[in-house]
Amino acid sequence: MNTEDRLTELEVKIAFQDDLLDSLNNTIARQQQQIDLLQQQLRLVYQQFKAAQPDSGNSGSSLRDEIPPHY
């Protein structure tokens, strides 16, 4: 294999690697957007959960107090 053929082969490989790198970069950017959205949704669900909880001012009660007597 002569030098020109080797150079052409390397140029082709670099072109494919550049394309792959761009594709991976786009995938990572899209995944980061999805992660950001999921974190925002999780915060909203957590806030809704906390808002739906009864007032925890009665610190003497426990889950055991809420079990029906027949258990």
Image (cartoon, rainbow, N blue to C red):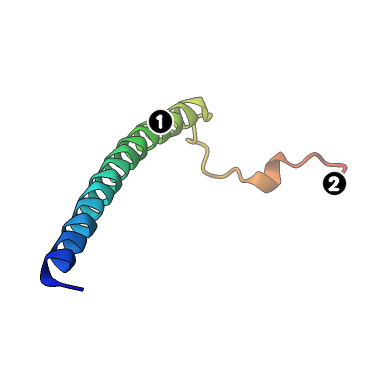
Q: Amino acid at mark 1?
A: Gln
Q: Which residue is mark 2?
A: 71
Q: Is 68 situated above or below 52?
A: below
Q: Residue at x 45, y 30 (%)?
A: 45
Instruction: Determine the residue located farthest toward the front in the rendered image.
Output: 2
Q: Position of residue 24 (x, y in %)?
A: 29, 48
Q: Secondary structure at mark 2?
A: loop
Q: Label 1, secondary structure: give it.
A: helix
Residue denoted by label 1: 41
Q: Where is 29 relative to 50, above or below?
A: below
Residue 29, quarter of picture: top left
Q: In the image shown, does 41 or 53 lie closer to the viewer? A: 41
- Across and down, in percent, residue 48 comes to 45, 26
Image coordinates for residue 20, horizontal then vertical, percent: 28, 50
What's the residue type where badge 2 is placed? Tyr
- What is the x, y in percent for residue 62? 61, 46
Q: Nearer the viewer, residue 30 or 14?
A: 14
- Residue drawn at x 30%, y 35% is 33
Numbered label attached to residue 6: none
Give the Cα separation between the discs numbered 1 and 2.
Answer: 37 Å
Is 66 on the left or on the right of 13, as rendered? Answer: right
- Which part of the image, by quadrant, shows the N terminus? bottom left
**Farthest bottom residue in view:** 1
- Asked if 33 appears above or below 2 in the picture, the reply is above
Q: Is residue 9 left or right of residue 46?
A: left
Instruction: Give the mark nearer the N terminus: 1 vs 2.
Output: 1
Residue nearest the observer in this picture, 20 or 14: 14
Question: Quick check: 53 above or below 21?
Answer: above
Q: Residue at x 51, y 43 (%)?
A: 59
